[in-house]
Image: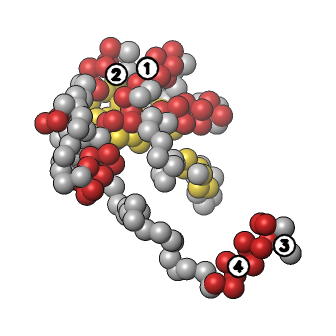
Amino acid sequence: QSLVLKGDIGRIHISGGYGTMGCALPYAIGSCISINKKVTYCIAGDGGFQMNIQELETVKRENLPIKIFILNNRVLGKISETQHTNHKDRYAQTTVESGYTVPDFQKIAEAYGIKAATLKSYQDLDNYKDWFFDSSPCLLNIMLPKESYLTPKIKWETSAIYPVLPEDIICNVKNILRGNN
């Protein structure tokens, strides 16, 4: 999915609703290269970011001005939310308490030669404002409460998207799809 912003501000690429994990950094790399290495922002969760963490090497090697924001609640969010909602809090490898491990993203980025910081609160962002617009890559690991959930959520048991189309329209579409014009 892609949203074009008003004016010449840019575009937002999101994978929300597709069930994908790990595409934020590759999306950001492709976007940054396609716009001649202009500043690009990447927002990822701690679980998804780990799926393509090796791409930090590409970011550093190509000196891409990608500003990476990791929203880190130390939980595989959507999966643990499902385990909470549908499986009576039987967590399996989705929380720190149930076996999920989260690396120190700041140290990993620094090992690649990318400037990085870990923020304990949103107020800490003010200390790094100058990083947002310079021409070098950076990573900000933003620590969030474990109970941070992504909403709204479509539930499994929802059988139809509302508002429901009138029955005659549904029948017409079915007939067209079957070739019964």
- Which quarter of the picture shows residue 46? top left
* For marks 2 and 3 on the same chain, the one whose residue lies earlier in the sequence: 2
Q: Quadrant of residue 86?
A: bottom left
Closer mark to the observer between disc 2 and disc 3: 3
- Circles 2, 3 touching at the beta carbon (< 8 Å): no
Q: Amino acid at mark 2?
A: Ala
Q: Amino acid at mark 3?
A: Asn
Q: Identify the residue under disc 4.
A: 171
Q: Could you tell me which secondary element the residue under label 4 belongs to?
A: helix
Q: Amino acid at mark 1?
A: Gln
Along the viewing direction, whichever of 40 and 80 lies nearer the viewer: 80
Among numbered discs 2 and 4, the one appearing first in the sequence: 2
* Nearest to N terminus: mark 3 or mark 4: 4
**Disc 1 target residue:** 54
Q: Nearer the viewer, mark 4 or mark 1?
A: 4
Q: Work out which quarter of the rendered image holds the C terminus and state it.
A: bottom right
Q: Nearer the viewer, residue 165 or 49?
A: 165
Quickly name the residue at label 2: 109
Residue 47, image x, y percentages: 33, 35
Q: CA distance from mark 2 to mark 4?
A: 55 Å
The count of marks equals 4
Which residue is identified by label 3? 180
Give the Cα distance between marks 2 and 1.
10 Å
Decide: few, some or many residues near mark 3? Use Cα within 10 Å; few <14, some 14-19, many ≥20. few
Mark 3 lies on a secondary structure that is loop
Q: Is residue 42 left or right of residue 126?
A: right
